[in-house]
Amino acid sequence: MKNRFNLVTVLFLCLIGVLTACEPAAQQMVSQANEPKEAGLQPLAEGSPNEPMPIVLGFSQLGTESTWRLANTRSIQDAANEAGITLLYENAEQSQEKQFEAIRSFIKQKVDVIAIAPVIEQGWESILLEVKQAGIPVIIVDRMVEMSDSSLYVTFIGSDFYEEGRKAGKYVKDKLTESSKPLGIVELKGTEGSTPSIGRGNGFREVIQARKDLVMLESAYADFTPRQGKEVMKKYLQAHGGDIRLVFSHNDDMAIGAIDAIEEYGLEPGKDIIMVSVDGTRQALEKLIEGKLNLVVECSPLLGPNLMQAVKEIMEGRSLPKRIVTPETVFTEVTAVDEVENRPY
Ligand code: GZL
């Protein structure tokens, strides 16, 4: 019995020893998880001692001017959500100065990556230098910036606007057969100094210049909005009336405004006046099916997944191509029928 008592005592003392020896280690684990890391870094996320903090992406969006732009913003927000990336979204309402302010706030917040959809091409070198000095990588989205130092950005994700303009020009040359009389064209341009307006205008002109009967009667900016597209088209009709054979609109929203103006003037868009546009919104495809638009060149706003993939690869230290082009097609009244229901915007 005595021996048994001694054995129980020894075992009990061993158990106490083991428990007290483990405690500091257990205690240490808890305190480590809760202690903030050295300055500038974030404490590990709650309840996930080994999970890294989410990537933080600062995104300066140029505005909300068109159906395309709203779809572009939604694509980027949805893709960030899907990728578990924290998105700081700032809408500049067409103001480059507001984009600069947003970018400086991203620098102050020490975001991991900055994405910019630049409203116009000029004037970005110095702000991009500030970002480079802060050691934050930059991705240019949708439209491009003019710069001499390509080290100021990692990659440009967006469409080939020059090719979009060429596609529109090729259609015009096929649709308007050679004539002994001049065939009048009017152009609705987007935002002055923006990459899509520069590229689409130049690509279109490169193709139609071969035809002497295709005459550009008027060309003016309408800032990608339906209201301004209608206003400018009304002025064109007052000045040229029935001499207008074709409208080349740099986006669908302006083309839809122009359709209203043409119908109010008493002519039939798509028949009396051939209508060529760019983007590929659902509304535009519906107008194609109604015969009020004749061609829509696709320009995809769905850049979100490509952007988030690029952000992740940058954070993994991988190199990226300087240019990531979104593949695009053209829509006619025939192909629009299959596509219209699938348009997410
Ligand atoms: C093109 C984009 C243009 C769209 C317009 O990538 O920048 O801006 O064509 C939009 O609809 O407003």
Image (cartoon, grey):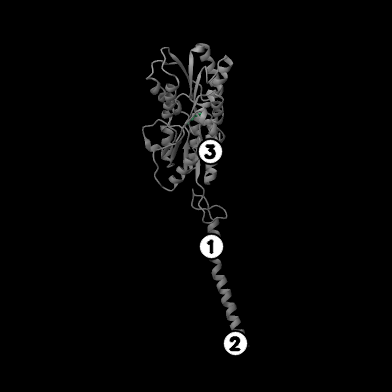
Residue underneath mark 3: 75
Q: At which x and y percent is residue 318? A: 40, 46
- Sequence-wise, the earlier of marks 1 and 2 is 2
Residue underneath mark 2: 3
> Where on the picture, by quarter, is residue 149?
top left
Give amino acid for label 1: Gln
Q: Is residue 140 above or below residue 312?
A: above
> Looking at the image, which is closer to me, 296 or 163?
296
Give amino acid for label 2: Asn
Q: Nearer the viewer, mark 1 or mark 3?
A: 3
Q: Quadrant of the C terminus?
A: top right
Instruction: Characterize the local packing of mark 2: few (<14), some (14-19) or many (20 or more) Cα atoms within 10 angstroms.
Output: few
> Where on the picture, by quarter, is residue 167?
top left
Asked if residue 320 can be seen in this view, the reply is yes
Give amino acid for label 3: Ser
> Looking at the image, which is closer to me, 168 or 11?
168
Residue underneath mark 1: 28
Q: Quadrant of the N terminus?
A: bottom right
Q: At which x and y percent is residue 264? A: 59, 16
- Sequence-wise, the earlier of marks 1 and 3 is 1
